[in-house]
Image (cartoon, rainbow, N blue to C red):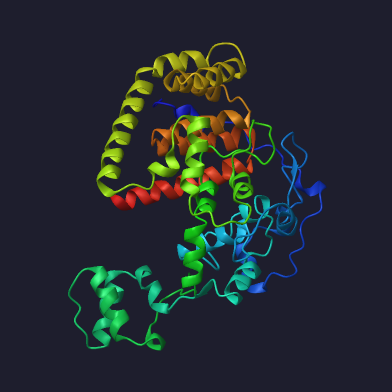
């Protein structure tokens, strides 16, 4: 058995009890977009109904009453949609619209929300040429050859040549789906309110209430600015991070290239050191898994060690608890947060998947799985 191979086994997902609650109306969704959503009964008015984690979904309309719009009138969920459009994913994303739009932001009809942003001038249809990157080199060369154009050069050069010389109406892209892009207004809006995508992806964000202490999420930051232009959001969020976690990542993530390169090298070194440490503790972890108990004691000790800053010892305890298949979602969340801190993305993915099996598919764990998978793919592209 390899290191932490126990993470690949586990219990079956618990019953989520969705059928016992009514689900949100989907009648406004364009029939052509239905395939990009989960079945209707997935969108219940309570997340995780029938479990101890059950909580009411706050709809977008309700959120508008308890949060603050930007100076241009956009609310948090709409600003986050701009970020997804900036990435060229919407509408009709290949993997479908994730459940976070409903369970975290209260939007059932994402397509309608996008249309509203387009009507207000924040997004527009991207030219067909923007999708040329989906074609293979051979396909681009055939397109150029047919048009009597040179076929030499790297893929980027081929794309530029096609875009510059072949009219939009003559471009044939298999499986083409029109996507939105930001207008100048949309880019300004997203740049000014960058705290929204930052907090959406934050590994330490909390729930809406004070269950885990002082709330730290996109809504708590939104209330700090109260509709004012948050041009200094990195400073504000960074100060909170420094107070709560001892490190200001909001400001440090906005540095020049040389510092970033040095920081990256340091992170790689920390990651390798942590991996080596955990490998040296493999036997201790395996023996701990086979001791009596359900994992609660180890999880509690791990939480205490982490609060004292002893990340290494905390991870050992967390892994023992996970190996015993302890079913507390907080265990998997806190372990994932620590692994993300050290850039151990593959390990984080295994932990999150184990959490989904052992404690049920919480929205937090499902979102973490989606995000860490994206990060792993992004890192592969850099190699």
Q: Which image quadrant for residue 27?
A: bottom right
Position of residue 285 relative to residue 64, above or below, is above
Nearest the viewer among 87 and 186 is 186
Q: Residue at x 28, y 85 (%)?
A: 165
Would you say 24 lies left or right of 36 here?
right
**Image location of residue 9, percent across then percent down:** 53, 31
Q: Residue at x 67, y 73 (%)?
A: 31
Nearest the viewer among 1 and 310 is 310
Nearest the viewer among 276 and 188 is 188
Position of residue 213 relative to residue 187, above or below, is above
Q: Which image quadrant for residue 311?
A: top left
Q: Report whether residue 70 is seen.
A: yes
Quadrant in the picture for the N terminus: top left
Q: Report whether residue 180 is seen.
A: no
Nearest the viewer among 284 and 108 is 108
**Image location of residue 127, percent across then percent down:** 43, 78
**Image location of residue 270, percent across then percent down:** 33, 30
Position of residue 71 relative to residue 165, above or below, is above
**Image location of residue 358, percent across then percent down:** 61, 32
Q: How many marks?
A: 0
Q: Residue at x 59, y 66 (%)?
A: 72
Position of residue 115 relative to residue 104, above or below, is below
């Amino acid at each position: 058995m390899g290191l932490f191979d126990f993470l690949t086994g586990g219990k079956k997902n618990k019953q989520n009890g969705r059928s016992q609650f009514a689900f949100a109306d989907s009648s406004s969704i364009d029939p052509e977009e239905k395939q990009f959503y989960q079945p209707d009964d997935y969108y219940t008015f309570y997340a995780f109904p029938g479990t101890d984690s059950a909580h009411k979904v706050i709809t977008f309309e309700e959120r508008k009453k308890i949060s603050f719009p930007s100076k241009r009138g956009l609310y948090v969920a709409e600003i986050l949609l701009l970020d997804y459009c900036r990435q060229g994913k919407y509408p009709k994303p290949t993997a479908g619209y994730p459940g976070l739009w409903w369970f975290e932001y209260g939007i059932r009809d994402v397509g309608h929300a996008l249309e509203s942003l387009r009507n207000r001038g924040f997004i527009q249809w991207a030219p067909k040429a923007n999708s040329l990157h989906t074609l293979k080199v051979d396909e681009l060369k055939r397109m150029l050859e047919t048009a009597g154009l040179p076929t030499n050069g790297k893929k980027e050069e081929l794309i530029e040549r096609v875009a510059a010389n072949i009219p939009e109406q003559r471009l044939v892209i298999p499986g083409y789906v029109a996507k939105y892009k930001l207008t100048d207004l949309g880019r300004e809006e997203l740049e000014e309110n960058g705290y929204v995508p930052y907090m959406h992806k934050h590994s330490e964000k909390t729930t809406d209430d004070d269950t885990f202490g002082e709330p730290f999420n996109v809504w708590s930051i939104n209330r700090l600015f109260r509709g004012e232009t948050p041009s200094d959001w990195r400073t504000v969020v960074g100060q909170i991070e420094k107070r709560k976690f001892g490190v200001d990542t909001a400001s440090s993530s906005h540095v020049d290239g040389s510092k970033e390169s040095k920081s990256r090298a340091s992170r790689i070194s920390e990651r390798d050191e942590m991996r080596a440490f955990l490998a040296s503790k493999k036997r201790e972890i395996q023996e701990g898994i086979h001791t009596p108990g359900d994992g609660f004691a180890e999880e509690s000790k791990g939480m205490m060690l982490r609060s004292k800053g002893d990340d290494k010892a905390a991870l050992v305890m967390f892994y023992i608890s996970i190996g015993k298949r302890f079913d507390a979602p907080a265990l998997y969340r806190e372990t994932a947060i620590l692994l993300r801190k050290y850039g151990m993305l593959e390990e984080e993915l295994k932990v999150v998947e184990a959490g989904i099996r052992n404690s049920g598919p919480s929205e937090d764990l499902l979102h973490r799985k989606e995000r860490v998978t994206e990060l792993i793919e992004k890192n592969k592209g850099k190699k």
